[in-house]
Image: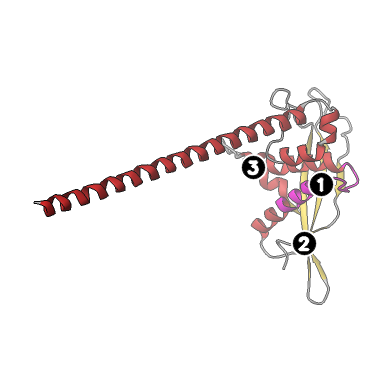
Amino acid sequence: MRELQQSDSGPASNGCQSDGVAVGGGQRGARVLKAGLRTVVVLCLLTTLVHVVLVFLHVAPANTVSKRYTTAINAWVYPYFEQNWRLFAPDPDSVNRQILARTADTGADGSVKVSDWFDLTAVDNSTVEHNPFPSHTTQNLLRRAWTSYTETHGGDDKARTERAVMIQKYLNNIAADRVTAHNGGTFDFIQLRVITQPIPAPGTATSGPRTPAETRLLPWWKVTTHGK
């Protein structure tokens, strides 16, 4: 009887210890989980606060703070959080633009082969025409890239800011991707030509002399991702 009681009491005490360890481990795990959730929530709140402050400084009138931290504000806002008022005050284009591209390929003997001009705008127009649901990319990607280029470069094609360099690479990559998708092959350089034709105002006589088109020839740009 004594041995039986001792044997019965032994496992019972071990079971209590195991349950205690399990409960203690579960409590520690719950505390760690709660601490992790609190940390994530705090980080999300701080990120949201920083985002709101930087975007506010970006859209607010120029002030001492925004001028001092212009580099940090632009690095955060562009290109994903750009803000403008075009939704409320749209400014439609008053000109028609035709953007063309040609490529140059350098041979092993040093000779350079230049391709014919390829009309990038015509490709977009043909995709949009008779399409009831044209994509945003087809309608605006190339057009917005060129608008941003003119805003950051002016008329001399010189990139004086980090944003100007980024926009130049952006436009370069779009043109190179379009040419590769339609013509294939490899090339080392690409050049753009933009023909701008003003749109006559409504009611303007069509018989009179038309405003001549403006042609802008950009410099040759090195293309590494589509080169040999």
Residue 27, horizontal then vertical, whole percent: 40, 40
Say if 223 sits above or below 124 in the image: below
Q: Give the amino acid type for the residue marked by disc 3 in the picture.
A: Thr
- Mark 2 Cα-neighbour bin, 10 Å: few <14, some 14–19, many ≥20: few
What residue did someone put label 1 on?
162
Q: Are marks 3 and 1 in contact (CB under 8 Å)?
A: no
Whether residue 117 is visible, yes or no, is no
Locate residue 188 relative to residue 185 in the image: left or right.
right
As drawn, the residue found furthest toward the front would be 2
Q: Indicate which disc residue 115 carries.
A: 2
Write the start and end of the magenta stretch as one range: 154-174
Q: Is residue 156 magenta?
A: yes
Q: Residue at x 48, y 37 (%)?
A: 34
What residue did someone put label 3 on?
137
Q: Is residue 163 magenta?
A: yes
Residue 82, horizontal then vertical, whole percent: 71, 35
Helix, strand or loop at disc 2?
loop
Separation of marks 2 and 3 at Cα, in angstroms:
26 Å
Separation of marks 2 and 1 at Cα, in angstroms:
31 Å
Q: Residue at x 86, y 40 (%)?
A: 213
Q: Main secondary structure of the magenta part?
A: helix
- Mark 3 Cα-neighbour bin, 10 Å: few <14, some 14–19, many ≥20: few
Q: Quadrant of the C terminus?
A: bottom right
Residue situated in front as seen by the camera: 36 or 198: 36
Q: Residue at x 88, y 48 (%)?
A: 158
